Image (cartoon, rainbow, N blue to C red):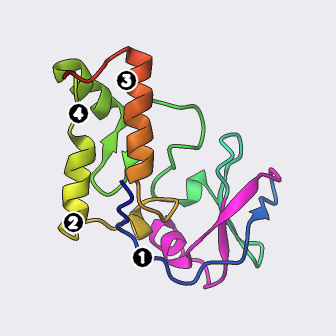
C-alpha cells in the first residue's frame, strides 16, 4: 500500500554525514525538528536526521546545531537498543508490543488498518510527530512482518 499521510515541502539538499558519528543522514523538515525539540526551537535552517543507534545525535543543522536524545520530546525508536515498547506509530502511539499482543491474542492484527483509517480521516500528523517526518505505514508493515516471523505467528486463513 502506498498511502502517504504527510505532504512533503522543501527538503534540505541531499544526505549529509552526522558530525559526531559520520553516519549518512537523511534530510528532515525544520517543522519536524521544531515540533519535537524539548527546549528552545532551533533557528530555521536545513536539518538532517541521524539514525545511527549508537549516536546520541538525533538532528543536526547546517549551522552546527545538534539535538541529542535529551533535547527531543520523544526518543526515536531507532536510537539505542531495540525494545518492544518502541513506537512504530507516533501519531496513534502503537508499539511493537501492541502488535505482538494482538498477534498472540488473535493470530492477526488490525493496527495497520486502524492507522490507515485514521490517515484517510485526516487525523495523522507524521510530519511533526514522527521523528523522521514521514508517514509510518511502511515501518508499521515491516514491524508486523518482523513480529510474525520472530514469534512464528502466522495469519489465520
Q: Position of residue 47 (x, y in %)?
A: 65, 72
- Asked whether 26 falls inside the magenta stretch, the response is yes
In the rendered image, which quarter contains the C terminus? top left
Gap in angstroms between the C-alphas marked 3 and 4:
10 Å
Gap in angstroms between the C-alphas marked 2 and 4:
19 Å
Q: Earlier in the sequence, mark 2 or mark 4?
A: 4
Residue that badge 1 annotates = 7
Specify whether 139 is left or right of 51.
Answer: left
Q: Which mark is residue 44?
A: none
Element type at marker 3? helix
Q: Earlier in the sequence, mark 1 or mark 2?
A: 1
Gap in angstroms between the C-alphas marked 1 and 2:
13 Å
Pointer 4 with pointer 1, Cβ within 8 A: no
Q: Position of residue 65 (x, y in %)?
A: 71, 71
Specify whether 95 is left or right of 14.
Answer: left
Q: Which mark is residue 109?
A: 4
Q: Residues within 10 Å of mark 2 (few under 14, many from 20)?
A: few
Gap in angstroms between the C-alphas marked 4 and 1:
27 Å
Amino acid at each position: 500500500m502506498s498511502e502517504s499521510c504527510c505532504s512533503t515541502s522543501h527538503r534540505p539538499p541531499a544526505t549529509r554525514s552526522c558530525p559526531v558519528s559520520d553516519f549518512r543522514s537523511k534530510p528532515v523538515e525544520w517543522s519536524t525538528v521544531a515540533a519535537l525539540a524539548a527546549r528552545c526551537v532551533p533557528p530555521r535552517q536545513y536539518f538532517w536526521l541521524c539514525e545511527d543507534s549508537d549516536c546520541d545525535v538525533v538532528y543536526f543543522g547546517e549551522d552546527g546545531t545538534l539535538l541529542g536524545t535529551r533535547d527531543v520530546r520523544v526518543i526515536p525508536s531507532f536510537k539505542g537498543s531495540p525494545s518492544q515498547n518502541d513506537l512504530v506509530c507516533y501519531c496513534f502511539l502503537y508499539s511493537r508490543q501492541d502488535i505482538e499482543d494482538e498477534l498472540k491474542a488473535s493470530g492477526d492484527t488490525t493496527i495497520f488498518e486502524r492507522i490507515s483509517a485514521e490517515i484517510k480521516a485526516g487525523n495523522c500528523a507524521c510530519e511533526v510527530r514522527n521523528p523522521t517526518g514521514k508517514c509510518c505505514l511502511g515501518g508499521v508493515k515491516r514491524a508486523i512482518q518482523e513480529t510474525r516471523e520472530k514469534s512464528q505467528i502466522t495469519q489465520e486463513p
